[in-house]
Each structure stands twice: as structure tokens, then as C-alpha cells.
Image (cartoon, rainbow, N blue to C red):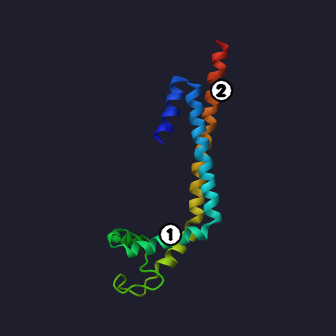
Amino acid sequence: MMLVGFFGCCGAVRESQCLLGSFFACLLVIFGAEVAAGVFGFLMKEKVIEEVQNFYIASTKDTDNSTLIENYHKILDCCGGSDPNPTMCPQPEVKNCFDAISDFFNDKLFLIGCVGLGIAGVLIIGMVFSMVLCCAIRNNREVI
């Protein structure tokens, strides 16, 4: 990201079409990756939830990840997998983490999509400004 910002800032300051074009190309690649990730996330939502649940299972088996497991439990207000472990979950009335992970993704999907659209909007504005500035530099040099 620092390299992309460097292309944009130096291209604007030095009035370099090459740097502004590189900035535009980098933003275009980032925009394409964001769109692809968003489409993949919406179409494969169940697979993403399943992978996060599998990561949770793998984390509970590894004894070095106690802080990660505590963060899962604290943030999602859950404890244990599909069958709660009494050593990990002293309160049996708390919902299991599989349901909590699924509920989290289903509840926050709209918010995640809105944030993605906001970032995409900023990228599009950056691309438009870089091309406008690049064209203005080109037209200004032709006049001189």
C-alpha cells in the first residue's frame, strides 16, 4: 500500500504520467481483487463459515492458542464446539461456537458488503482523479 501511495503522491507532485498510470493500474488490480473476493465471499458463504469453524476446531486442539480461543469466546459470546467441553466451558447455558460463528457471518454480511462498497467507491474516485490528472498533464505538455 505504501508503494501504491508513493506512485500516486510522487506522480501528482512531479506531474509524471508514468507514475500516475502505475497508480491507476495498481488501484485497478486492487479493485478487481476486491470485487473477486466479494463475489467469492457471497457465493461461497457456507464454505467460508465452514472453514472458520474448522479453524476454531484446529485452534482448540493446539494448546498454544489459548489466547485465540479466549478471544473467540469473548467476542462471539460462545463456548466450545458442537458439544461443549466442561473443562473449557464451565457454564453450559452459553451457546456453542459453531452456531455463534454462523450467526456472526449471517448477521454481519450486510455490514461487510457495505464496507466493501465504500472501499470500492474510494478506489474508483482515486482511479478517476489519477486519470483526470494524467490527461491534464498530457494536454498541458502538448500546448507548450
Disc 2 residue type? Cys
Which of 37 and 14 lies nearest the eye of the viewer? 37
Residue for point 53% across, 28% down:
11
Compared to residue 117, the image places residue 140 above or below, namely: above
Q: Residue furthest top?
A: 144
Q: Nearer the viewer, residue 52 or 127?
A: 52
Neighbourhood count class around disc 2 (C-alpha, 10 Å): few under 14, some 14–19, many 20 upward = some
Q: Is 14 on the left-hand or right-hand side of 92?
A: right
Res. 135 mark: 2
Q: Nearer the viewer, mark 2 or mark 1?
A: 1
Q: Residue at x 64, y 22 (%)?
A: 138
Disc 1 designates what residue?
A: 52
Seen in the image, is 48 located left or right of residue 62?
Answer: right
The answer for how far apart the CA atoms under marks 2 and 1 are is: 46 Å
Label 2 or label 1, whichever comes before in sequence order: 1
In the rendered view, would you say 34 is above or below 91? above
Q: Marks 2 and 1: CB-CB under 8 Å?
A: no
> Three-letter amino acid code at disc 1?
Val
Quadrant of the drawing holding the C terminus: top right
- Is disc 1 placed on a helix, strand or loop? helix
Q: Residue 27's spot in the image, x, y percent?
A: 58, 41
